[in-house]
């Protein structure tokens, strides 16, 4: 038996850090990823697709987003099973209870509304641990699996949950933490064959048979390995998991040490070499010291890159770049008399590391630019 | 550049004149028309006007009325060059340049003109040339030194190179104005982004609040749902509880009914028993009543007999009393008649006595009245009253006075009879030894018979005194006549008679008043008439004397009083007896009626007892009463049993529990309904919020905010950078400019202290213009200075410039008729300054007054004479 496990579609998610033109593309990318999963299911002969929570970004989404999402659900030719997560809990505001959803949803789409084992296809049960509020008060997966008896012979049982697991959760005291140990016992006791979880956007194997499929399309800079789904086979031989790439967007951090014009040029080359720039967001973090001239060049390179990438950003918190004029910078500009004195003052301020340091660096850069233009 | 010599030919009024310049100060002296001012003009034309020019400046210097071409020949040294340059305009125009050093050259025409200018440009600062010329009429203006490159070089050399960087500064300014207004406020996109950022932050906050609210609604929904579930369970339990209690309550009702039934049964029995008791009692009372009423009737019969006896006695007494009363009435009637007669007699007697008295008083009064009337009549006939008499006496007295006064003025004569010889004065004889005085108002005669007769006549009396006396006399006479008397003495006698008559009248009046006793005479007369009429003929009377009559009257009165006393007593007795008789009669009748009624009632009661005994004999009543008591006892026992059963069932506690259960169910139902309403309300709110797509709106707002913040941060950095750059550059430029002008300022001050004193200082702007002068601590702007001071400062500027500039590069300072505004002290001081400048620079002074520069130490003085 083969099925696709995925999670954290976060449909309707808006990346506020993107530019106005990139944002709609990023928004669409999540729907496109879902559509690719539909195709993948068909291509690989998966019996069903289970989405482990956070199908929607929020219960407060515009209902037009729900309508467009359901259009994508229609593309699935196999049962599509949705688990409410912390972003789209089954509470009073739930999308799954809204007329916009209920009036449109096709028959092959199911929502796991309780802990009752759901026979998605003959011989396969899914036991879901849906979130019914944003702040549940316990290990929902433990609650869902507690009453389970060992799976009947010939029945494959899949646990679908959502939340941080105890072995990976930095906040071990959180009430909602899913006990990895308990879940492992469920598998070892034969009460289920495999457990798939949502919430962690990077594809992760928690323990044998326990997986986070991750988000099928990147959502945040810090994700290590998002943009995948899991193709899972369960048979007599056991459980086999294959990671399949679905993401098209890249969020990357570029850290460089810049100390010379050559370094700046090398950075330019590196940026130019990045493919699919319109689907790539780059956070830049620099350290080092640049001359005013080299910094002016850096700004020029970044200005050009800004037009190409979905997002290119100085990551201020991680940037420690000093811009200081060197003798050559202003010597060749023919600045003399009082302008020289001004440059000396500004350089002093720039090197001073005081309050005006940054403004002084910028002022030097500006002076450089204006002097060049003034010839 | 240094001038060597200049020759003017046919130039304005000069036919030909040559001036040789010294290397220091040359003073060229000559009247205006001689052409001293033509020298700088000629140098200017040489430089600027080609020989072929017909410019106004050229035609203006042609000699008047002479068709000759003006010509100028100038020898000078500039840089390495030594040359002579000659030009003639208009007639036989020519240009000639001869260069003696460093290489000999000879050029003519435009070639010469161009070469000359080229040499000047190569070796001189043209701006300095212009600036150094102080042309007549311009002396108050400061030279334009800012553009003088040689001065700039000189200044740069001393304080570092000054580069204005105008284009760069302009660009910085333009860049600054992208972000800030001139007053330093944020503007343009920078400002707009800040505003937009604030607006977006507000949007985000608002949307976040909405989102938060929606979450709150969701949470509330969850809480209310949970509460509703709890309420549902409680409701179920409470309902069961209530039903059980309701069943228990129904059983309780049956017990209560039994108690009520037993109570009613007991009541019936008790009532029956009571009724029988009443029957027995009634029977007993009836028997007693029969006996009592019989006794009562007998007693009444005895009382009636007694009353009849008393009535008879009372009638007898009453009859006797009436007879006595009639007798007493007769006696009193007799007494009254006797009294009336006696009184009548007495009255008549009194009237007669009264008439006699009144008639006597009337007679006396009539007589007195007659006397009074006579006296009054006499008073009235005498006209002299007290007033008149007083008037007459006053007039008499006046006459006496007037006479006295007149007499005092008249002569008097004293006559004394010395012996027995009679002396007669005016017929009056004097006795022996007698002496008398006579007033001589009329002629008088003194005679001693036989001896002498003396006629004495009064002199003339003063006429006014005489007149006064006559007036007094006339007044008195007039008054006497009017009073009808002859003299005042007569008048006095008449007045005394009048007084006496008045006294008699008053006396009569008093007597009359006494007689009449307040009445009038007429009233007294009427009274007498009335009394006479009343008595009629019976005025004499035969009723006896007054004393016996009065005694009889007293006796009759006493008799009457006694008769009335007897009558009153008889009337009281008759009344009392009559009332007693009546009372006795009524009492007897009432008793008789009561007795009849009592006898009848006694008969009826006896009949009622008979009838009752016939219906229920006394023994039967006794037996029924005993049975009823037994039944009451049984019913009471049954009631107690039922009450005990009810009490065992704890009815109050049960009812309290039941009431609580009912109210609990109601309360839970209410809470359930309330919860359901809350749920509906929250669902409606959630549906409404869900439609708003808060997430998308918030995400968009956040994106816009972040974008704006990023853009703003970038602009902010740029703005801070350009502001810092602008400030830094401005600060440095100002400092640089200050250090640049310092040597120039110091030079002016050095020279100026000679002229103005040791505390002289100036403020020089960066374009090398003197802004103000400070002297004795007082700073005055250049424009506000006196003309003399302005002229002297402007000259100092030029001279300072000349001293600063390198000698090789310098140009001669040409002063045309300068210092017209300076006084001799200043002129002397300026002479010192010019001498100092002349040691390092060429100075040419053109003047028409040589004495202005007399104190100038090293000057060469050249006098121009008219040709």
Image (spheres, coloured by chain):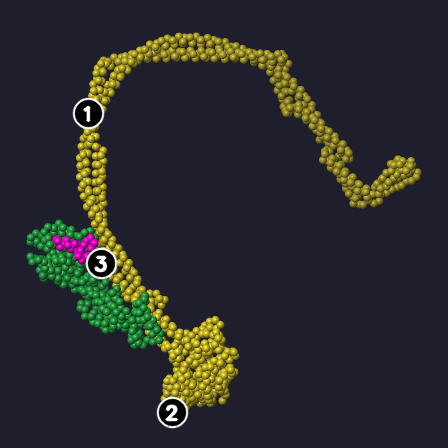
Chain colours: A green, B yellow
Task: Name which residue lies at 75% across and 36% down.
Answer: B393
Q: Secondary structure at mark 3?
A: helix
Chain containing the residue with disc 2: B
Residue B866 is a magenta residue: no
The relative height of residue A246 versus residue B352 in the rendered view (above or below) is below
Task: Name which residue lies at 37% across and 84% down.
Answer: B121
The relative height of residue B398 versus residue B502 in the rendered view (above or below) is below
State how many labels appear. 3
Magenta segment: A161-186
Chain containing the residue with disc 3: B
Distance between the alpha carbons at the discs numbered 2 and 1: 175 Å
Q: Quadrant of the N terminus of chain B?
A: bottom left
**Side (left or right) of B537 relative to B325:** right
Q: Nearer the viewer, mark 3 or mark 1?
A: 1
* Pointer 1 local density, CA inside 10 Å: few below 14, some 14–19, many at least 20: some
Q: Main secondary structure of the magenta part?
A: loop
Badge 3 vs badge 1, beta-carbon distance below 8 Å: no
Q: Secondary structure at mark 2?
A: loop
Does label 3 lie on the same chain as label 2? yes
Residue B638 is tagged as: 1
Quarter of the rendering containing residue A179 = bottom left
Distance between the alpha carbons at the discs numbered 2 and 3: 93 Å
Residue A168 is a magenta residue: yes
Q: Nearer the viewer, mark 2 or mark 3?
A: 2
Q: Earlier in the sequence, mark 2 or mark 1?
A: 2
* Pointer 2 local density, CA inside 10 Å: few below 14, some 14–19, many at least 20: few
Picture coordinates of residue B125, whole percent (x, y): 39, 82
Residue tagged 3: B696
* Pointer 3 local density, CA inside 10 Å: few below 14, some 14–19, many at least 20: many
Chain containing the residue with disc 1: B
Residue B482 visible within the image: no
């Amino acid at each position: 038996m083969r099925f696709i496990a995925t999670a954290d579609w976060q449909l309707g998610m808006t990346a506020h850090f993107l530019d106005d033109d990139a944002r709609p593309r990023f928004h669409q990318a999540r729907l496109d990823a879902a559509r690719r999963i539909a195709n993948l299911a068909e291509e690989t002969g998966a019996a069903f697709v289970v989405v482990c929570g956070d199908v929607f970004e929020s219960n407060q989404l515009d209902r037009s987003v729900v309508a467009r999402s359901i259009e994508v659900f229609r593309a699935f030719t196999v049962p599509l099973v949705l688990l409410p997560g912390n972003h789209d809990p089954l509470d009073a505001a739930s999308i799954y209870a809204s007329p916009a959803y209920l009036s449109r949803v096709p028959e092959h789409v199911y929502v796991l509304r309780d802990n009752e084992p759901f026979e998605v296809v003959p011989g396969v049960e899914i036991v879901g641990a849906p979130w019914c509020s944003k702040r549940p008060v316990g290990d929902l997966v433990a609650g869902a699996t507690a009453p389970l008896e060992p799976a009947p012979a010939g029945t494959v049982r899949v646990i679908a949950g959502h939340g941080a697991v105890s072995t990976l959760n930095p906040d071990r005291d959180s009430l909602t933490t899913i006990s990895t140990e308990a879940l492992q016992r469920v598998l070892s006791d034969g009460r289920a064959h495999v457990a798939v979880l949502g919430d962690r956007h990077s594809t992760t194997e928690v323990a044998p048979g326990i997986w986070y499929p991750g988000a099928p399309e990147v959502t945040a800079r810090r994700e290590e390995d998002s943009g995948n789904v899991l193709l899972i086979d369960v048979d007599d031989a056991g459980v086999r998991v294959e990671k399949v790439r679905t993401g098209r967007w890249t969020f990357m951090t570029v850290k460089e040490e810049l100390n010379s014009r050559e370094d700046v040029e090398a950075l330019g080359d590196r940026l130019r070499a990045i493919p699919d720039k319109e689907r790539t967001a780059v956070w830049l973090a620099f350290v080092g010291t640049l001359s005013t001239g080299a910094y002016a060049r850096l700004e020029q390179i970044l200005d050009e890159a800004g037009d190409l990438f979905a997002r290119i950003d100085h990551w201020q918190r991680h940037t420690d770049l000093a811009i200081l004029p060197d003798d050559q910078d202003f010597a060749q500009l023919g600045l003399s008399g009082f302008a020289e004195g001004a440059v000396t003052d500004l350089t002093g301020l720039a090197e001073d590391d005081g309050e005006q340091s940054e403004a002084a660096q910028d002022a030097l850069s500006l002076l450089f630019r204006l002097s060049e233009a003034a010839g | 550049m240094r001038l060597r010599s200049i020759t003017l030919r046919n130039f304005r009024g000069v036919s030909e004149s040559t001036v040789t310049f010294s290397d220091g100060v040359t003073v060229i002296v000559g009247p205006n028309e001689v052409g001293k001012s033509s020298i700088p003009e000629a140098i200017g034309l040489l430089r600027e006007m080609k020989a072929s020019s017909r410019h106004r400046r050229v035609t203006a210097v042609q000699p008047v009325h002479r068709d000759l071409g003006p010509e100028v020949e100038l020898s000078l040294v500039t840089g390495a060059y030594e040359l002579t340059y000659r030009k003639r305009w208009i007639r036989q125009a020519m240009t000639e340049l001869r260069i003696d050093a460093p290489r000999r050259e000879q050029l003519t025409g435009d070639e010469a003109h161009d070469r000359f200018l080229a040499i000047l440009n190569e070796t001189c600062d043209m701006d300095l040339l212009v600036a150094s010329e102080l042309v007549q009429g311009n002396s108050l203006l400061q030279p334009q030194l800012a553009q003088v490159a040689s001065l700039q070089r000189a200044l740069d050399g001393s304080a570092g190179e000054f580069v204005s960087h105008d284009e760069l500064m302009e660009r910085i300014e333009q860049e600054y104005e992208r972000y800030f207004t001139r007053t330093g406020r944020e503007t343009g996109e920078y400002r707009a982004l800040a505003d937009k950022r604030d607006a977006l932050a507000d949007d985000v906050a608002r949307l976040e609040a909405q989102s938060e609210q929606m979450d709150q609604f969701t949470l509330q929904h969850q809480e209310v749902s949970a509460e509703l579930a709890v309420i549902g369970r409680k409701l179920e339990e409470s309902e069961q509880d209530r039903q059980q209690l309701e069943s228990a309550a129904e059983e309780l009702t049956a017990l209560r009914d039994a108690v009520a039934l037993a109570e009613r049964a007991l009541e019936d029995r008790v009532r029956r028993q009571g009724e029988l008791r009443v029957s027995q009692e009634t029977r007993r009372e009836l028997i007693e009543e029969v006996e009592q009423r019989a006794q009562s009737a007998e007693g009444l019969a005895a009382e009636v007999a007694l009353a009849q006896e008393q009535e008879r006695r009372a009638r007898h007494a009453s009859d006797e009393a009436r007879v006595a009363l009639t007798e007493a009435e007769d006696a009193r009637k007799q007494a009254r008649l006797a009294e009336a007669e006696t009184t009548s007699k007495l009255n008549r007697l009194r009237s007669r006595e009264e008439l006699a008295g009144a008639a006597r008083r009337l007679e006396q009064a009539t007589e007195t009245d007659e006397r009074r009337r006579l006296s009054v009549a006499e008073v009235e006939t005498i006209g002299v009253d007290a007033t008149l008499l007083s008037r007459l006496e006053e007039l008499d007295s006046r006459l006496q006075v007037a006479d006295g006064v007149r007499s005092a003025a008249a002569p008097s004569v004293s006559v004394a009879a010395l012996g027995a010889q009679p002396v007669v004065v005016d017929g009056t004889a004097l006795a022996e030894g007698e002496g008398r005085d006579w007033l001589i108002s009329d002629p008088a005669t003194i005679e001693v018979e036989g001896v002498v007769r003396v006629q004495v006549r009064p002199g003339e009396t003063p006429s006014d005194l005489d007149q006064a006396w006559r007036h007094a006399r006339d007044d008195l006479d007039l008054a006497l006549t009017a009073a009808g008397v002859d003299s005042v003495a007569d008048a006095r006698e008449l007045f005394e008679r009048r007084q006496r008559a008045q006294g008699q009248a008053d006396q009569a009046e008093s007597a009359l008043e006494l007689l009449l006793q307040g009445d009038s005479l007429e009233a007294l007369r009427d009274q007498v008439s009335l009394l006479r009429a009343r008595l009629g003929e019976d005025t004499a009377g035969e009723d006896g004397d007054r004393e016996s009559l009065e005694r009889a009257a007293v006796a009759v009165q006493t008799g009457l009083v006694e008769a009335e006393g007897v009558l009153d007593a008889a009337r009281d007795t008759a009344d009392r007896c009559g009332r007693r008789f009546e009372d006795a009669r009524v009492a007897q009748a009432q008793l008789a009626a009561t007795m009849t009624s009592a006898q009848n009632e006694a008969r009826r009661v006896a009949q009622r007892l008979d009838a009752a005994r016939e219906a229920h004999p006394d023994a039967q009543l006794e037996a029924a009463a005993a049975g009823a008591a037994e039944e009451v006892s049984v019913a009471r026992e049954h009631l107690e049993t039922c009450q005990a059963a009810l009490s065992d069932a704890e009815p109050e506690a049960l009812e309290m529990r039941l009431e609580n259960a009912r109210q609990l169910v109601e309360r839970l139902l209410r809470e359930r309904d309330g919860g359901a309403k809350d749920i509906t309300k929250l669902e409606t709110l959630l549906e409404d919020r869900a439609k708003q797509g808060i997430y998308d709106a918030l995400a968009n707002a956040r994106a816009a905010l972040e974008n704006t913040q990023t853009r703003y941060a970038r602009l902010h950095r740029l703005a801070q950078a350009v502001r810092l750059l602008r400030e830094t550059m401005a600060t440095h430029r100002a400092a640089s400019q200050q250090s640049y002008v310092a040597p120039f300022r110091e030079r002016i001050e050095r020279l100026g202290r000679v002229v103005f004193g040791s505390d002289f200082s100036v403020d020089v702007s960066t374009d090398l213009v003197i802004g103000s002068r400070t002297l004795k601590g007082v700073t005055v702007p250049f424009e506000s200075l006196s003309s003399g001071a302005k002229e002297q400062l402007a000259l100092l500027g030029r001279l300072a410039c000349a001293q600063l500039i390198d000698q090789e590069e310098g140009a001669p300072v040409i002063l045309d008729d300068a210092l017209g505004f300076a006084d001799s002290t200043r002129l002397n001081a300026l002479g010192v300054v010019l001498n100092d400048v002349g040691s390092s620079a060429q100075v040419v002074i053109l003047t028409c007054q040589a004495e202005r520069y007399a104190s100038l130490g090293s000057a060469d003085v050249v006098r121009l004479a008219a040709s």
